[in-house]
Image (cartoon, coloured by chain):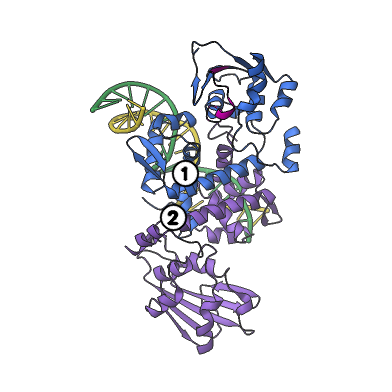
Chain colours: A purple, B blue, C green, D yellow
Amino acid sequence: MKSVYGQFCPVAVASEIFAERWTPVILRELVLGSRRFNDIQRGVPRISRALLVKRLRELAAHGVISNENGEYQLTEAGHELGQVVVHLGTWGARWTAPVRRDRLDAKLLTWDMHRRIALDRLPEKRVVVRFDFRGVPAGNKAPKTYWLLLERPEVDLCIIEPGFDVDVYVDADLASFTKVWLGELPIRQAIRDGDINVTGDRQSARDFPSWLLLSTLAAVSRPVAVVQRRVA
Amino acid sequence: MKSVYGQFCPVAVASEIFAERWTPVILRELVLGSRRFNDIQRGVPRISRALLVKRLRELAAHGVISNENGEYQLTEAGHELGQVVVHLGTWGARWTAPVRRDRLDAKLLTWDMHRRIALDRLPEKRVVVRFDFRGVPAGNKAPKTYWLLLERPEVDLCIIEPGFDVDVYVDADLASFTKVWLGELPIRQAIRDGDINVTGDRQSARDFPSWLLLSTLAAVSRPVAVVQRRVA
DNA sequence: CGGTATCCACTACGATACTG
DNA sequence: CAGTATCGTAGTGGATACCG
């Protein structure tokens, strides 16, 4: 391992580990709970398999993660580095421009969502939610329809019809739903404005917004100047 | 500006700004107080001028810094991102391996030191400290001798004889002094072990360790396992 | 599922020299 | 002091196919 920066400063040494391409995003997946290779890659879909392997090895070599029979785990050092990831993400939520069209990704969004369901607020029985996204940027080849199978304590994400009756239909503009997810837009407002439509079983449709926890960074407060920039 | 990661997640968006090559190190210089282009480059000597220009422009475009008639300044967003830099450096001080030989750099070390002098503990009169480093890795072409001119409230670093009488001579093994600077080794111990020799004016030589504040990350606590790894 | 292996394209970067 | 301009290249990583 050759030193990139050739500096003794701990910021430089840590940057050689942390500030490599893809590494913060990979660490985010681990912080959010992914353990297996393919799960991690679902959260970082645009990385090549070879590069993901390489990055994971590097993190392991630096003592940030371990791999025991196929399960990647953050070490103690890794959990502390995970706090830096959260800090960086918090900064991003506060200070970066509102979500851009070329970052929209329905597959990634639903993958994130399936990890943030308030299981304890679900009814006992299985609930199936079908999402249909509109306003997907042209050229994006990802599916527009997804199913969330909520069956305590399991949550499964499907991209093909799961074969159960659908309880809740969510028809949403992708940009708006992404903003809701990121805390940039209150879901009730998006529903009022017609950007998100929730139909189906009356009770379930009413409760749906309360099951869906948002991104862990959705609660970050934004400075007034940035909020105004968003409106512009 | 094309999106590197193509993800809406604030961690990914922030990483496109922060986790670029050299950027955390440049931000560290700004956090430590450098304002002018050439001062910043003294703290990041191995970056090319062209790339430093490019990175500074990128940071400005993202609202992290501003440039007003030659003075770079962190914006409010920049100060908050600076906290992430500090967090990352703190992690590095805690969890990365002890300083490696290929990271030793006397020029950088003295440049860092000149910003960390306890001015209020200095005597009224001018003090000149001469550093001679031994144990510099072969092939390193940087000077081995440096002078620190302490003249309240100014601190100047010279690489040529400043023309004043020297009050304190510091003769030190570069690796040991770097460890002292990083808080890995108590200075009194390094002096006892003969790794650092401080001679010259009796009073000044005795007070020298109290003038020299160490790296802002020197006080970070290290887990037992890492400390032991260092001894090994 | 969790990787390897190969090959090629690109581009980011360093080196060097010049400038208002 | 604070950049610009030019050019050659190392090395990074994407695409694709294969493997235990």
CA neighbours of label 1 inside 10 A, class few (<14), some (14 to 19), many (20+):
some
| Quadrant for the N terminus of chain A in the image | top right
Q: Looking at the image, which residue sits at the far bottom?
A: A202
Q: Looking at the image, which residue sits at the far front?
A: B124
Depth check: give the residue in front, B67 or B117. Answer: B117
Amino acid of disc 2: Trp
Left or right: residue C10 versus residue B202 is left
Residue at the spot x=55%, y=64% of the render?
A216
Q: Provide residue C7's location: percent of width, then percent of height.
A: 47, 42
The verdict on residue B67 being magenta is: no
Residue at the spot x=74%, y=26% of the render?
B189
Task: Give the label, 2 or 1, closer to the camera.
Answer: 2
SS class, disc 2 = helix
Depth check: give the residue in front, B94 or A137. Answer: B94
Q: Provide residue B81's location: percent of width, then percent of height.
A: 49, 48
Q: Which mark is residue B20?
A: 1
Give the extent of the magenta segment. Answer: B114-129
Residue at the spot x=51%, y=65% of the render?
A219
Q: Which mark is residue A130?
A: none
Which residue position is annotated with label 2? Answer: A95
Measured Cα–Cα span from mark 2 to mark 1: 17 Å
Q: Is residue A88 visible?
A: yes
Left or right: residue A194 versus residue B231 is left
Residue B147 occupies quadrant: top right
Q: Provide residue C9's location: percent of width, then percent of height.
A: 39, 44
Q: Main SS of the magenta segment? A: loop
SS class, disc 1 = loop
- Name above or below for residue A141 compared with residue A54: below
Q: Is residue B101 visible?
A: no
CA neighbours of label 2 inside 10 A, class few (<14), some (14 to 19), many (20+):
many
